[in-house]
Image (cartoon, rainbow, N blue to C red):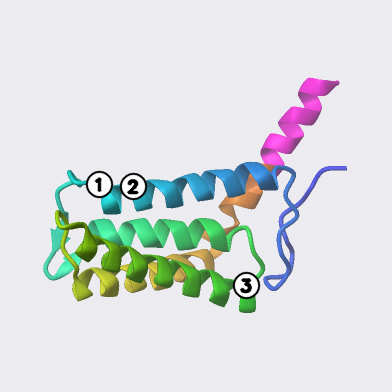
Amino acid sequence: MRPEPAKHPSTAPRLAFPRLWRAIGWACVALVVYLSLTPDPLPPAELGDLDVAHAAAYAWLAFWFAQLRRRGVPWIATAAALCALGIGLEVLQGWTGYRTFSYADMRDDVLGVAAGLALAATPLGAILPAVDARLARTRGTLQR
């Protein structure tokens, strides 16, 4: 029996490889933490007052984790956790002595989370379950 993407938006998708997808998500979180606290960060990519790197990183995290959870309270919890991560990392940056604390970066993190969840609410939010189902079919074919 192969897993299929969720048919109802409030239902969590049944995934064949949930640990893999969560591990990739947590690796992305670890990368964001590392890049936020390293003494030699990537140069900022700004578009006006918006730090695109911050917004893109948090949009990606929200989009990724939203595909692993059902809509509603789990999405709100994911958004709150990612916003707390961004705020916490900004505070830690201020304490490092070699990075700076920035309210604007916090704002950009929150905007990124909102954008990621909005994107996950579109048909694009079914990409990960579709890839998972395809991998499960391929794995089943290879095992025969």
In the displayed structure, 10 sits above or below 139; it is below
Q: Mark 1 falls on what kind of element?
A: loop
Q: For this rendering, which residue is in front, 128 or 50?
A: 50
Discs 2, 1 touching: Cβ within 8 Å: yes
Q: Residues within 10 Å of mark 1 (few under 14, many from 20)?
A: few
* Nearest to N terminus: mark 1 or mark 3: 1
Residue type of the residue flagged with mark 1 = Thr
Q: Residues within 10 Å of mark 3 (few under 14, many from 20)?
A: some
Of residues 50 and 23, the one drawn nearer to the viewer in this rendering:
23
**Label number found at residue 38:** 1
- Label 3: element kind: helix
Q: Which of marks 3 and 2 is nearer the N terminus?
A: 2
Q: Which of marks 1 and 3 is in front?
A: 1
Instruction: Check disc 2 and report the residue beneath it.
Output: 34
* Residue 75 is covered by the magenta coloring: no
**Three-letter code, disc 3:** Pro
In the rendered view, would you say 134 is above or below 68? above
Q: According to the image, label 3 marks what residue?
A: 74
Q: Can residue 72 be seen here?
A: no
Residue at (54, 69) in percent of width and height? 78
Quadrant assignment for the C terminus: top right
x, y (%) of residue 98? 14, 54
Q: In this view, does 76 lie to the left or right of 95?
A: right
Residue drawn at x 28%, y 60% is 54
